[in-house]
Image (cartoon, rainbow, N blue to C red):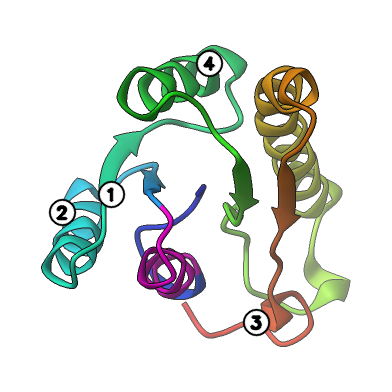
Amino acid sequence: MTGASSGIGAATARLLAARGMRVLVNYLRSSTAAEGVVADIEAAGGRAMAVQADVRDPVAVERMIEQAEAAWGGIDVLVHNALTPYVIKPFQDMTWEELGGKLDDEMRAAFAVTKAVLPAMTEQGWGRIIYLGTGLSRRPAKA
């Protein structure tokens, strides 16, 4: 699961583990937070591992997928939750670089992780791909 070290991602990772799934807790910067999610899952009897990867980078994504395959044989479900931080200010003051960069990063990440898991899912004849979003795009929280 991408973006699983905090917030909606961490809550979703814990829920999936509680329902019997093994969870790869992907994070970009906070290994402490990701390891905390793994510890919570394992304390509740689940199985999880934390893997650092910038999901905008196809090479990093491939390494992350390889770790999951080595540990668990593959990925049956992709939950893509990683979002790019953005400048919080009125739209009329925002530049295209600020907004367009966020959109480009998020589409690049969704493309990279989907492209990485799709071949194995196609070969096995099934899989699930879930993309999560947030209402913060409509009502951003204060930084």
Name the residue beneath numbered marker 1: 48
Name the residue beneath numbered marker 4: 62
In primary-sequence order, the first of circles 3 and 1 is: 1
Q: Position of residue 3 (x, y in %)?
A: 48, 53
Q: How crowded is mark 2: few (under 14 residues within 10 Å), some or many (20 or more)?
A: few
The amino acid marked with disc number 4 is Glu
Q: Specify whether 111 is left or right of 51.
A: right
Report the magenta residues as a range.
9-21
Q: Position of residue 46 (x, y in %)?
A: 25, 61
Q: Specify whether 97 is left or right of 66.
A: right
Q: How crowded is mark 4: few (under 14 residues within 10 Å), some or many (20 or more)?
A: some
Find numbered disc 1 in the image and state the secondary structure of the residue it sits on: strand
Q: Specify whether 68 is left or right of 117.
A: left
Find numbered disc 2 in the image and state the secondary structure of the residue it sits on: helix
Q: How many marks on residues?
A: 4
- Measure the C-alpha gap from mark 1 to mark 4: 19 Å
Q: Is residue 46 above or below residue 128?
A: below
- Measure the C-alpha gap from mark 3 to mark 1: 31 Å
Name the residue beneath numbered marker 2: 32
The amino acid marked with disc number 3 is Pro
Q: Nearer the viewer, mark 4 or mark 2?
A: 4
Q: Residues within 10 Å of mark 3 (few under 14, many from 20)?
A: few
Find numbered disc 3 in the image and state the secondary structure of the residue it sits on: loop
- Measure the C-alpha gap from mark 4 to mark 2: 23 Å
Q: In this view, does 22 lie above or below 65?
A: below
In primary-sequence order, the first of circles 4 and 2 is: 2
In primary-sequence order, the first of circles 4 and 3 is: 4
Q: Position of residue 101 (x, y in %)?
A: 74, 42
Residue appearing at x 18%, y 72% in the figure: 44
